[in-house]
Image (tube, coloured by chain):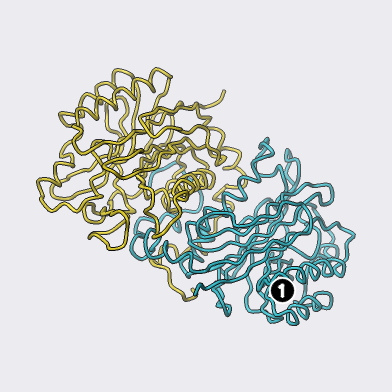
Chain colours: A yellow, B cyan
């Protein structure tokens, strides 16, 4: 009998600045009910799901900044989502801004039927610490978030080994490889990706290609399923890509969201699909040659000098 | 003024067992003349370009095996190709089976206007050392080739920093990352990829997806051009994929071969296209976090245990 896991991804439309946590949690709850009604066992929500994507602004007032962060999880406004998940018997990935003492992280958690079973803090923080001239939009994540300090952990959920990453992490092959080496079955990732950020003058079609290309290649190269959830649509005047999807270990997109709004997609994933690759072409133990990979940990930046 | 480099890829149709080196070199020369006439400066030829893809057979007679290998490069039969390249003022990547004393490698060289300026020996040797039951075709590279001992060097050619890899190497993100960390501008790769090898029962469309997916994601993630040359068509009864292409640092396929035969494709590559990415989203020095990548060199195989 196939070892299957029914995954859902809950893409979200924009969350504007004046939307309250309670309004957002009501939308998340609706999406969770939809996914559960289809039979999904796990639901991936986006990055920084509870508020608008505030790192587009340079905020100086600490009180204004901290209003976007969660001091406890679940908190008063998020407790209903945990309760609903317990009632429905589902698990979920949720991204949020975490305030831990005075440390700020871009965080995701894995919650199984109301209990937190895993946490990840974003490692590849993109953008800048100060506003940059010449960019059509600002992306100030380095102003607000420390580099994650939890590595890339993989958690033993009841049906599968689940790992997490957040947004820009998905473009870095190291992210998935560290999880692939822990035999990850499913990687969940939430993202907020504005159009026209990657490089100055970048053609507008490229962020869509880059999103799927990164997700598909890494699913294939690490023989895992990837469940990717966007916050999409025009948020505070900034258009963001959708393209939420569930990718198979074949590198194929099994299902994708076609809207730029709140939308659930789901797929019954065959967790054994990876086995053929893991025993042959991607049998890491037989084929990997770390003695030739040292530069990956020894060199940080790219240098025009030979090793 | 843009810093451009005119690249060509010379895909080859099948080379059967009874084809002589001289016949093959005549085909390579014809392809080289075609590429040079279009104005190309560098030409990528396939993996194991000089003979049929012999690792599909379990050969036991050392003389029969060694007949597929080159003891010197250039040798008597390959010298005309070097002479032609000097005359035409072009450089090329050539894959061949190398006999170095009694050591056998799957090798490629970088030849600039008749002079060898770089060598690479394939590191990710796929397949098996002995025939395997249950596979529709055999792939016995581990029987014939040692793991390469030269790392992933990047060579300073006059116009660009050029790196090489061979066939299965292109599926492994470590391959390109080690070269990306050396600011590689162009990665050249030759391949022989039979349909229906990756895993038992794999649908026939997947090898085509996996080829482009691996090439495109790695070009994007390492901000380099990739020039990929297939040996295609039905060789000794075994169908192999074509899909030779030149991929941009945007991850886009700039040009691709549509035949399964000898065919030249070419593109004038903007080497500065990478700069926008290298200074922002893929500024490795600012964003990479090797302290969280240790598993990539410390763990060889995948293990269902957390780090």
Name the side, left or right, on which B153 lies relative to A23: right
Other residues around mark 1 within 10 Å, as few (<14) / some (14–19) / many (≥20): few
From this view, report whether residue A75 is shown above or below residue B88.
above
Indicate the quadrant where residue B4 lies: bottom right
Q: Residue at x 20, y 33 (%)?
A: A19
Percent coordinates x, y for residue A50 in the rendering: 24, 35
A117, A254: nearer the viewer:
A254
Percent coordinates x, y for residue A259 in the rendering: 42, 32
As helix, strand or loop, the secondary structure at mark 1 comes to strand
A138, A36: nearer the viewer:
A138
Query: What residue sits right under mark 1 in the picture?
Result: B100
Percent coordinates x, y for residue B18 in the rendering: 90, 59
Q: Residue at x 60, y 67 (%)?
A: B268
From this view, report whether residue B78 is shown above or below residue B177.
below
Percent coordinates x, y for residue A119 in the rendering: 29, 40
From this view, report whether residue B163 is shown above or below residue A161.
below
From this view, report whether residue A99 is shown above or below residue A260.
below
């Amino acid at each position: 009998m196939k070892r299957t896991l029914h995954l859902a991804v809950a893409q979200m439309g924009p969350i504007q600045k004046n939307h309250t946590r309670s309004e957002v949690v009501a939308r998340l709850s609706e999406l969770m009910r939809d996914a559960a009604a289809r039979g999904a066992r796990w639901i991936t929500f986006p990055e920084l799901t509870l508020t608008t994507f505030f790192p587009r602004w340079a905020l100086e007032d600490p009180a204004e900044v901290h209003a976007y962060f969660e001091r406890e999880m679940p908190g008063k406004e998020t407790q209903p989502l945990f309760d609903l998940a317990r009632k429905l018997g589902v698990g979920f990935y949720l991204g949020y801004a975490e305030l831990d003492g005075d440390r700020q992280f871009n965080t995701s958690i894995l919650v199984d039927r109301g209990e937190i079973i895993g946490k990840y803090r974003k490692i590849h923080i993109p953008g800048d610490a100060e506003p940059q001239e010449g960019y059509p939009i600002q992306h100030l994540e380095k102003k607000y978030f420390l580099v994650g300090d939890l590595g890339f952990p993989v958690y033993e959920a009841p049906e599968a080994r689940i790992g997490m990453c957040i947004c820009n992490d998905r473009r870095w092959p190291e992210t998935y490889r560290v999880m692939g080496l822990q035999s990850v079955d499913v990687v969940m990732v939430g993202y907020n990706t504005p159009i026209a950020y990657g490089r100055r003058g970048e053609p507008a079609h490229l962020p869509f290609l880059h999103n799927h290309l990164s997700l598909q290649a890494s699913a294939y190269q690490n023989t895992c399923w990837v469940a990717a959830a966007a916050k999409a649509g025009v948020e505070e005047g900034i258009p963001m890509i959708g393209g939420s999807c569930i990718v198979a270990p074949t590198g194929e997109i099994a299902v994708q969201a076609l809207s730029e709004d709140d939308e659930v997609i789901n797929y019954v994933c065959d967790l054994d699909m990876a086995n053929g690759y893991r025993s042959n072409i991607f049998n890491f133990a037989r084929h990997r040659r770390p003695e030739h990979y040292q530069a990956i940990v020894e060199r940080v930046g790219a240098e025009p000098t030979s090793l």
